[in-house]
Image (cartoon, rainbow, N blue to C red):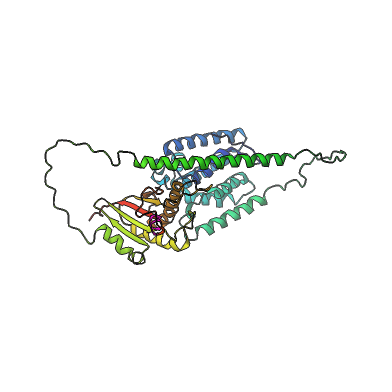
Amino acid sequence: AETIPRVGINPLAAAAAPLLDLVGRLRNTVRPPEAGDLRERAIAALRQFEADARAAGVPAEQIRAGHYVLCATLDDVVLNTPWGSQSPWATASLIATFHRETGSGERFFALLEHLQKEPGRHKPVLELMHLCLSLGFQGRYRLSPRGPAEHERVRESLYAVVMAHRQPPHRDLSPNWKGIEAPWRPPGRAVPIWVIGALAAAICGGLYAFFAFSLNSRSDEVFAQVLKAPPLAQPALARVAPPPPPPPPPPPQAGPDQPTRIATFLAPEIREGLVAVLASPQIIVIRIKSSGMFASGSASVTPRFVPILERIGQALRDEPGDVTVVGHTDNVPIRTVQFPSNFQLSKARAEAALAVIARAIGDPARLSAEGRADAEPIADNATAEGREQNRRIELVMPRMERPL
């Protein structure tokens, strides 16, 4: 791990620098880390924070308050990620481990109000709390309708208190500055360093683009060959076994089946020709017409399709099973820096659609995204109409009924 330099006028915040860096990185983490290992590293970093703060001469009262603030911040950030609430961290938070408490979302702000009564005495802790608020701690304001506005008001008020008790900086860049008397010399005719650097950067960028396009053009061919390689289906093992007993009678169904419920909910979109619901005995496929959902060569959902994707998320909110969002393209190659091939474009479009659906489905952890490029056409790519049908987004989920 990279060592964070412990510098600054606040020794308490300097000792907390590695933990503050961890908070900033966790808030932007997309892939879930190994929660148990992450928790052990956080505990070790908290103990190192106490040792560094004591070595810097920080009073024990401020160390205890700072330790509580850092535990609360790490818990708040981790437990509000898509992966944190399902990890062992949810049953063994840092606040519960070190401070035998559970309500840190409220206690943090109660401690803040108490320390602000004597800001001059508690200035190092207040500065650390301002850093935690700025890096993502929200506590009780996370679920409040006016939470973001109230959180920002508290953060700005705390900033004003901290700045009011800081010593004014030096007016000069250096208190001991003294000019050097040197005669002026005209510039030489040598090529400036920045010109050489710009030329080298341009050459490196050109080489990178050339090799990226070359690699992705070959990867498209390999991808197509892999799809055609045997076996084309999952091999099956034949086993000699006695005939199975007759299946029990199916339980009575309460109301329409799963595909009918989804199709009924999405009836307006189906009538407009924007959505189709397909079903087999094993899976359900919701096919979304991609024409108009994305601009050419783009992976940003157009405003017109945002409510349609949100409606689909609402239709699946109460339906069981995980959902795979799959992006498909036609066979027209794309060669851009952002999307070197149709595989990257189809994956990016699937992820963009997933981000909108996740806001309405209730449990974003059910969703995953895949890109299939032009590997699964449903129409002839030789015609413009066929290519338009092949550019699509599909939601694939197992067919299962809700328990009665």
Which region of the structure is painted magenta? 385-391
Q: Quadrant of residue 237?
A: top left
Q: Residue 9 at x, y = what percent? A: 66, 41
Magenta region includes residue 52: no
Look at 78% across and 45% down and name the residue there. Answer: 172
The C terminus is located in which quarter? bottom left
Magenta region includes residue 389: yes
Look at 37% across and 40% down and name the residue there. Answer: 226
Q: Nearer the viewer, residue 403 or 195?
A: 195
Q: Is residue 61 visible?
A: no
Above or below: residue 320 compared with residue 217: below
Q: Nearer the viewer, residue 72 or 197?
A: 197
Q: Residue 95 at x, y = what percent? A: 46, 43
Q: Judge from the rendering whether residue 351 lies leftward or rightward of residue 120; answer left or right.
A: left
The residue sitting at the front extreme is: 382
Q: Residue 181 at x, y = what percent? A: 87, 39
Look at 59% across and 47% down and name the residue there. Answer: 126
Number of marks drawn: 0
Q: Judge from the rendering whether residue 197 lies leftward or rightward of residue 402; answer left or right.
A: right
Q: Nearer the viewer, residue 130 or 399?
A: 399
Q: Is residue 359 visible?
A: yes
Which is the main secondary structure of the residues drawn in magenta?
helix
Q: Quadrant of residue 157?
A: bottom right
Above or below: residue 378 compared with residue 268: above
